[in-house]
Image: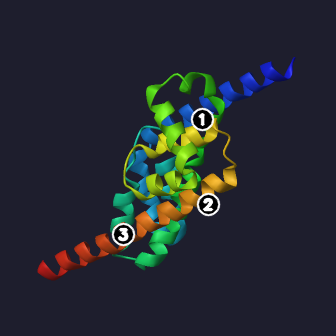
Amino acid sequence: MNDERRQLILRVLILLLVTGLSIYIYTIRDQLAGFEAYGYPGIFLISILANATVILPLPGVVITSAMAAVFNPFGVALAAGSGAALGEISGYLAGYSGRAVIERKEWHKKMVDWMQKYGDITILVLAFIPNPLFDMAGITAGVLKLPLWRFLLWTTFGKILKMLIFAYGGASIIRGLERIF
């Protein structure tokens, strides 16, 4: 079997794995709340799972906001942001494996242009802004074969910064509501 065929088979297998994982996590989304009882490691695991889905969004930031009222908001943001970054590897792998399919999409050309023009800052900004578009950034980074460590570095910074806002904001809102009621 030649190397090109082997690469194609590997890409298809990874794409199937990521798709299957996304569907599975989406179907058990109601059971994820049980991880909260495990403190920071539970928040970390929920965040990994919430961000491992490709295209199907799960409310990881809602859990971050709620848990920050129970635990230290800074610790919650670190656990949730780090977990979110690791979960985003699924998008990266989908891009790496699905290159032939993805390159034909119109949004892909725009994302490639942004990444080539602005580099790592594109990943940082898209990881920071709450939006469902980050999967596209991960997919594009995989297609461009951006080194995984660089993708994870900028994704982690962006996700932790975003989670800091949600953690402190959520803690403030929940504590304010507790004072009222």
| Relative side of 44 to 167, left or right | right
Mark 1 lies on a secondary structure that is: helix
Query: Which residue is depicted at the point 80% across and 21% down?
Result: 4
Mark 2 lies on a secondary structure that is: helix
Q: Which mark is residue 95?
A: 1
- Residue 5 vs 154, above or below: the answer is above
Circles 1 and 2 in contact, beta carbons < 8 Å: no
Query: Which residue is depicted at the point 24% across and 79% down?
Result: 175
Front in this rendered view, residue 162 or 179: 162
Q: Percent x, y for residue 79?
A: 52, 68
Which part of the image, by quadrant, shows the C terminus? bottom left
Instruction: Report which quarter residue 168 is drawn in.
Output: bottom left
Mark found first going from the N terminus, 3 or 1: 1
- Residue 98 vs 31, above or below: the answer is above
Circles 3 and 1 in contact, beta carbons < 8 Å: no
Kind of residue at badge 3: Ile
